[in-house]
Amino acid sequence: MLNDKTVVLGVSGSIAVYKAADLASKLTQAGAKVNVIMTESATRLVAPLTFHSLTDRPVVTSMWQAREAGIGHITLADTADIVVIAPATANTIARLAAGIADDMLTATVLATRAPVIIAPAMHTNMFRNQITQDNLARLRARGFTIVGPARGRLASGATGEGRLVEIGEIIDAIEKTLQKSADLSGKRIVVTAGGTQEPIDPARHIGNRSSGKMGFALAEAARDRGAEVTLITAPSHLPEPGGVAVVRVTTAAEMKAAVAKAVKQADALIMAAAVADYQPKSRAQAKIKKQSPEMTLELVRTPDILSEVTGSFIKVGFAAESEDLVANAQKKLKQKGLDLIVANDITEPESGFGADTNKVTMIDKEGNAESLPLMSKREVAERILDKVAGMGENPP
Ligand code: PMT
């Protein structure tokens, strides 16, 4: 797994830095090209020459030194198959979570498309501090893998959570992540996101509260696992994910046409979009004036995209439910001919429309149900893609 892989090993200034030398050595022995980047504090604890001797490659200690050595400020980001930060101090984690890029390590992490693993090491109180916990949650939600920390004796002499995990555990995480980062390689995945808008007149529409976050998280996660992704999105304020073909639509009818076109070559369609079920029978050409105290708007059904789309690809739907979650989702799974349905409990706080987190139950066509705890939408996306990748081995 590690042979010929390019690993960026980021080393920050924790006393556990000496263990990173062992990690660099083991990765090198396994055939990886290990490019070490040290923060300024790390260089005070272990000399860069140690890593240079173990990896037989230049060690970067600042952007300016890198430039003098002919290494551009994003070269290491571009060439990495994986970035591992071990040990990661509370300070480095905070700077990464804030998107700071004022040294070679943080700039590399901000610029890379490669998966990132973080192995924290710090005093228990720093780790338990809500600020550090929030920073880690933020990074996790962006798709970073956090390994550890472990419990044990700390540099202060106290015992508690905060020790760097064993090097074997970090290597396991690297191998698993590398495996996952390629498990959708060569697959074409179409994802829908956001809430469609059905115009009433030039000023108004029927819409819903979908932000697009769930669909965008799916598109980003699929891209990071090697898939070629088309994201068909109804209006959303989220920034377009890089490396994904984005198709913008407004109405259910437009989404249907875009889906029909995109699935021609697809291996899977995942519909996280909240598609309007009804649209105004006709669209007024001019803004409707207020007249009588009551007015009636005549609505007709929109096309049911999932039910009507055909082809030999894996079909995944969502079901936003406020009651009888599993039973209603199962009904939709059958009605729409799906391979998997993600039942979305929209009564839970922090779940469903607009939230950064989600609580779902995944149900397959054999009736197997798996309920997941509340987790970030990115983590939910990864779990859905685990299922899709598994089905890809035995396509429908
Ligand atoms: O965008 P976020 O703010 O992150 O919120 C995420 C979400 C709550 C919108 C998402 O997780 C979700 O649950 N999406 C599906 C919402 C929904 O409209 O469910 P539904 O039960 O009405 O539809 C069932 C399935 O059929 C869905 O996959 C839907 O995309 C699809 N559908 C629905 C109607 C229609 N006319 N055509 C369809 O294809």
Image (cartoon, helix red, strand yellow):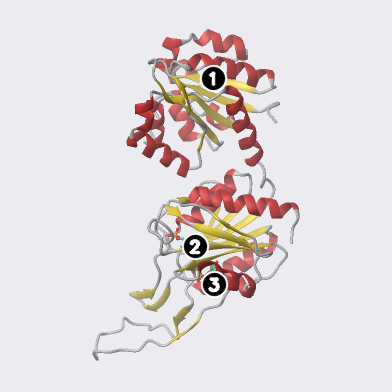
As helix, strand or loop, the secondary structure at mark 2 comes to strand
Task: Kindly tell me whether mark 2's CB lies below 8 Å from ligand 1.
Answer: yes
Q: Position of residue 296 (x, y in %)?
A: 35, 89
Q: In front of the other: label 1 or label 3?
A: 3
Q: Residues within 10 Å of mark 1 (few under 14, many from 20)?
A: many
Q: What is the spatial separation of the Cα atoms under label 3 and label 2, in whole angstroms?
A: 11 Å
In the displayed structure, 282 sits above or below 230; it is below
Q: Residues within 10 Å of mark 2 (few under 14, many from 20)?
A: many
Tell me which amino acid carries mark 2.
Asn
- Residue at 54% x, 52% y: name it: 381
Which residue is denoted by mark 1 in the rendering? 36
Q: What is the spatial separation of the Cα atoms under label 1 and label 3, in whole angstroms?
A: 52 Å
Residue 81 can be seen, yes or no: no
Discs 1, 3 touching: Cβ within 8 Å? no
- Specify the quadrant of the image occupied by residue 124: top left
Q: Position of residue 257 (x, y in %)?
A: 58, 70
Task: Kindly tell me whether mark 1's CB lies below 8 Å from ligand 1.
Answer: no
- Specify the quadrant of the image occupied by residue 167: top right
Asked whether 350 or 104 is in front, the reply is 350
Question: As drawn, which residue projects farthest toward the bottom?
Answer: 292
Asked whether 137 or 59 is in front, the reply is 137
In the displayed structure, 4 sits above or below 303; it is above
Quarter of the image where the N terminus is located: top right
* Label number found at residue 344: 2
Q: Position of residue 95 (x, y in %)?
A: 38, 31
Which residue is denoted by mark 3 in the rendering? 328
Asked whether 275 or 134 is in front, the reply is 134
Asked whether 89 or 102 is in front, the reply is 89
Q: In front of the other: label 2 or label 1?
A: 2
Question: As drawn, which residue projects farthest toward the right?
Answer: 394
Tell me which amino acid carries mark 3.
Asn
How many numbered badges does the structure rendering display?
3
